[in-house]
Amino acid sequence: MAIANQTDFHTSIHDNIGSPTAKYVTSGNHKNHRRRKIPKVHANEWAESIVNLNTKNITVNVYVDFQQNSLSNTDYTKLKSLASLGINHFWSRIIKLSSDNFNVTVTARNRKSRSIDVDLYIETGKDYARSHNSGLIDASFKYNKGAYMRNECNG
């Protein structure tokens, strides 16, 4: 089935990534709080997408808040740029929905609120340290300076 309209697109997306779930938001203080249902499909605060069914393009903005931690300003600026470029490159791809290919372009955008906190580190030891994004709740990107330099010297 080729995707002809928005309903077909949503059906195909839900077949591929699962049905949408309701989101609940609690507001107020501990004595007087309200819980309300938000009927958004696959909603979150750290990403937004634009789907163009005519051109078969999906644009996704991912909002990240890069944490400087103990990095110098120079290292922080460099790693923030490298991490953004990595997200843009490795998260973008072509996906197939039904019989149509969609070009997905992901762009990392720096924002302090309603974003994913991303810790940036430089691993200077000889051992390899792995970056992770534990369910995209807590992300740590590690630049393996020590492992890279060791491999460069050996190779």
Image (cartoon, rainbow, N blue to C red):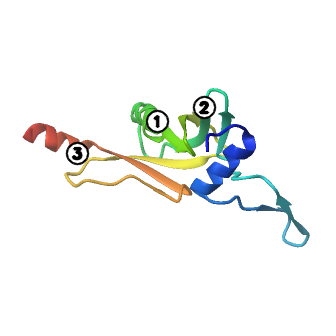
Specify the label residue 64 is tagged with: none
In the image, taking residue 151 as reference, residue 60 lies left or right, namely right
Quarter of the image containing the C terminus? top left
Earlier residue among tags 1 and 2: 2
Horizontally, is 106 left or right of 81 in the view? right
Mark linked to residue 56 = 2
Which residue is tagged 3? 146
Q: Nearer the viewer, residue 36 or 91?
A: 91
Residue at 22% of width from left, 55% of height from top? 127
Question: How far across and how far down the image is residue 116, in percent?
Answer: 58, 48
The quadrant of the image that shows the N terminus is top right
Three-letter code for the amino acid on which mark 1 is drawn: Lys
| Of 16 and 83, the residue lying toward us | 16
Residue 99 visible in the shown view? yes
Residues at badges 2 and 3 in contact (C-beta under 8 Å)?
no
| Residue pointed to by mark 1 | 80
